[in-house]
Image (cartoon, rainbow, N blue to C red):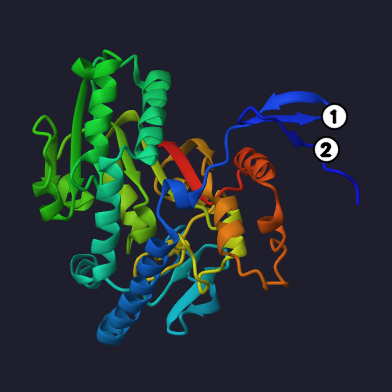
């Protein structure tokens, strides 16, 4: 067996190859940055229990849907989720989606009453108190968007949909202040959870308990940058959501969001019926449609947007496959990843980002 062409030096993040020394960002571990194995297992098991309970109580009220990305009716059946929730594949744009689907009233019950969401909320609050790296990365990227596309505007009006209690907006406010931009910006947030809005402790933020559709119908204002994170995969009607938010956008404004990439490595290695540390793009009644770099184009055009940029900046794919893929999964092409040295995993993480193959997708659209 030939030797590896890579040798890890004593300096963190420096790799020596036959072409010399070059720097590689340090390996990012899901188990260190996001949640422990025990936390992930507890949340997963509760999500499955809650999904089964919702189906048992409310499946009679589920609603058939056309493709939520492109609107096509033609579809093929995929493997059911947990043997009960039906999953379809659009024959036009290949989107995987849940149909029949829990309608908004049932989803409201799920998010307000089911225990798994409270468990995740407690975890996220603890991460925010400790200085959440994920939020900081998002804020840094938002500053880049503002600098590149919006600095020429006299006022920069920003709306976060699904703001929860305003944690990200509060950090963005601090970053704008440090950049001497806060006096030119207006920060607004909306969330359907009134109790989350009530927990806001930053009285400089303007937060409303409302859905995007309600906010748009009530002439909530006009915004230059609309943002949301891990939201559209949860929605019964993501197209209707995009149409509603477009009514809130200024001419040439930006619509920026994050969503799982169903073609990312960990979603390919661990399907939606496998135990996973993070939920797959298909995970009803939570995740109802799975987005990819390909179907986002259909989704954007149907809603009247053009794509400004799209990438997959996630770090955790390699770590999740290395730590969560069953070691006896001999039929998986990813089976040997857990055997790679740590420095090779760091290189692999960066490679996935460059290739657009991480399971975390970041999209910026223009109205």
Q: For marks 2 and 1, give the CA distance.
A: 6 Å
Residue situated in front as seen by the camera: 267 or 303: 267
Q: Which mark is residue 37?
A: none
SS for dot 1: loop
Disc 2 + disc 1, Cβ < 8 Å = yes
Instruction: Give residue 265's quadrant in the image.
Output: bottom right
Q: Is residue 41 left or right of residue 16?
A: left
Give the percent coordinates (x, y) of residue 123.
29, 54
Give neighbour class at mark 2: few <14, some 14-19, many 20+ (Cα, 10 Å). Answer: few
SS for dot 2: loop
Q: Is residue 71 left or right of residue 1?
A: left
Dot placed on the residue nearer the N-terminal end, 2 or 1 = 2
Q: Residue at x 24, y 18 (%)?
A: 177
* Most distant residue in the right direction: 1
Q: Which residue is mark 2?
A: 5
Q: Which residue is mark 1?
A: 18
Give the percent coordinates (x, y) of residue 215.
16, 46
Residue situated in front as seen by the camera: 150 or 1: 1
Instruction: Give residue 39's quadrant in the image.
Output: bottom left
* Most distant residue in the front direction: 10
Above or below residue 148? Residue 306 is below
Q: Residue at x 54, y 39 (%)?
A: 311
């Amino acid at each position: 067996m030939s030797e590896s062409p890579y040798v890890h030096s004593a300096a963190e993040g420096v790799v020596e190859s036959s072409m010399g020394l070059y720097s590689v960002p340090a390996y990012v571990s899901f188990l260190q940055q996001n949640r422990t194995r025990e936390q992930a297992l507890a949340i997963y098991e509760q999500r499955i229990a809650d999904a089964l309970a919702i189906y048992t109580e409310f499946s009679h009220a589920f609603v058939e849907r056309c493709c939520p990305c492109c609107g096509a009716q033609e579809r093929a059946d995929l493997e059911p989720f947990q043997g009960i929730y039906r999953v379809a594949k659009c024959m036009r744009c290949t989107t995987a989606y849940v149909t029949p689907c829990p309608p908004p009233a049932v989803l409201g019950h799920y998010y307000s009453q089911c225990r798994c969401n409270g468990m995740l909320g407690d975890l996220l609050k603890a991460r925010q108190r400790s200085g959440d790296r994920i939020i900081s990365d998002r804020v840094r990227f938002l500053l880049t968007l503002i600098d590149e596309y919006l600095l020429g505007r006299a006022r920069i009006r920003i709306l976060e949909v699904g703001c929860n209690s305003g944690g990200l907006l509060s950090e963005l406010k601090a970053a704008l202040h440090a950049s001497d931009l806060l006096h030119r910006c207006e920060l607004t947030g909306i969330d359907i959870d009134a109790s989350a809005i009530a927990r806001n402790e930053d009285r400089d933020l303007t937060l409303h308990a409302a859905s995007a559709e309600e906010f748009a119908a009530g002439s909530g204002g006009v915004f230059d940058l609309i943002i949301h994170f891990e939201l559209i995969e949860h929605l019964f009607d993501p197209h209707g959501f995009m149409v509603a938010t477009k009514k809130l956008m200024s001419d040439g404004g930006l619509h920026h969001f994050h969503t799982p990439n169903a073609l990312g490595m960990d979603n390919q290695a661990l399907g939606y019926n496998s135990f996973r540390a993070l939920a797959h793009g298909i995970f009803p009644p939570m995740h109802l449609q799975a987005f990819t770099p390909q179907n986002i184009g259909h989704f954007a055009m149907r809603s009247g947007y053009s794509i400004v940029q799209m990438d997959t900046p996630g770090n955790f794919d390699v770590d999740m496959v290395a730590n969560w893929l069953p070691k006896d999964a001999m039929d998986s092409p990813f089976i040997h990843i857990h055997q790679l040295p740590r420095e090779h995993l760091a290189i692999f993480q960066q490679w996935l980002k460059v290739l657009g193959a991480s399971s975390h997708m970041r999209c910026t659209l223009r109205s």
